[in-house]
Amino acid sequence: MEKITTTKLVAMKKSGEKIVMLTGYDCSTARILDEAGVDAVLVGDSVGMVKLGYDNTLPVTMDEIIYHARAARRGVKRALLIADMPFLSYETKPSDAVLNAGRLVKEAGVEAVKIEGGSEMVKNIGAVIDAKIPVIGHLGLTPQALHKFGGYKVQGRSEVDVKKMLKDARALERAGVFMIVLECIPAVLAKKITAAVSIPTIGIGAGPFCDGQVLVTDDLVGLYSDTSPKFVKRYAELKGLIASAVKEYGTDVRTGKFPAKENSY
């Protein structure tokens, strides 16, 4: 199958072909996603909440992202491998953004990085792009701004916010990002942004009009029993299946049923 590149994703928008993206934080999951034909695997800072037990994404470090991205790299052959730049790895100054983005490329083998923020991040984003590292923008509900927003709330409802987000999207495109993630914004606004830029938009809680969609894989396959966000659709309920298998294994061990003769050398 054709290797997915940044230019391929841009071409997919022009041809009207939808882009499929999912999160992958380890080799085995990333391999499954890749072999199933997803176009992009995102090593998101959501790993902090999904795999590391943090309350939000803010504690995630560069070393943690690199660790998980290196693991995902070993499982991905076709898809584009992307990593989030964690909180305070890019905001301080352009040189910090370049060095940390460079670590993700050099040490983890990612092919693009994702940076949250709009016009205020253009200078730092531009520096990363000048260093020959492809960048994806991220607008709307940017989880690293959790405390600024007062929680995980839908963004872009007011006219002022609509105008700012459209302005930010155009600014990110001019800065050179090749794609923009739109998170938790009204579908009508996502439609406007998608039409206003020539680069792909990827929605998560942003309605059906984006050029592609991304979800957290653990949400997609039902590894949590907690209430999922409205934008999540569960395609499987793996938590129950795994728990059932573990209980059956436990029973077999306790009763001496496992290992049986066929499981022994």
Image (cartoon, grey):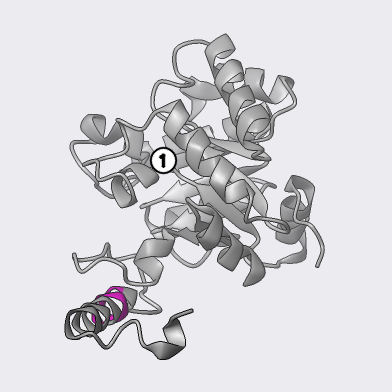
Q: Residue at x 65, y 61 (%)?
A: 39
Q: Where does residue 261 sit, x and y in percent of width and height?
A: 41, 89
Which quadrant would residue 134 be assigned to in this image? top right
Q: Residue at x 45, y 89 (%)?
A: 262
In the rendered structure, does residue 241 fall within the stretch colored magenta?
A: yes
Q: Main secondary structure of the magenta part?
A: helix
Q: Is residue 150 left or right of residue 131?
A: left
Q: Is residue 149 above or below residue 153?
A: above
Q: Is residue 89 above or below residue 27?
A: above
Q: Is residue 63 above or below residue 253?
A: above
Q: Where does residue 263 sit, x and y in percent of width and height?
A: 43, 83
Q: Nearer the viewer, residue 18 or 100?
A: 100
Q: Is residue 117 visible?
A: no
Q: Nearer the viewer, residue 228 or 231?
A: 228
Q: Where does residue 17 sit, x and y in percent of width and height?
A: 70, 67
Report how many numbered discs are placed on residues in the image.
1
Q: Which residue is mark 1?
A: 45
Q: Quadrant of the N terminus?
A: bottom right
Q: Is residue 62 left or right of residue 260?
A: right
In the rendered structure, does residue 44 fall within the stretch colored magenta?
A: no
Q: Is residue 137 visible?
A: yes
Q: Is residue 164 left or right of residue 107?
A: left
Quick one: SS at disc 1?
Answer: loop
Q: Residue at x 62, y 30 (%)?
A: 107
Residue lying furthest front = 265
Magenta region: 239-244
Q: Where does residue 110 sit, x and y in percent of width and height?
A: 64, 39
Question: Dot 1: within a 10 Å radius of its alpha carbon, few (fewer than 14), some, or many (20 or more) residues?
Answer: many
- Amino acid identity at mark 1: Asp
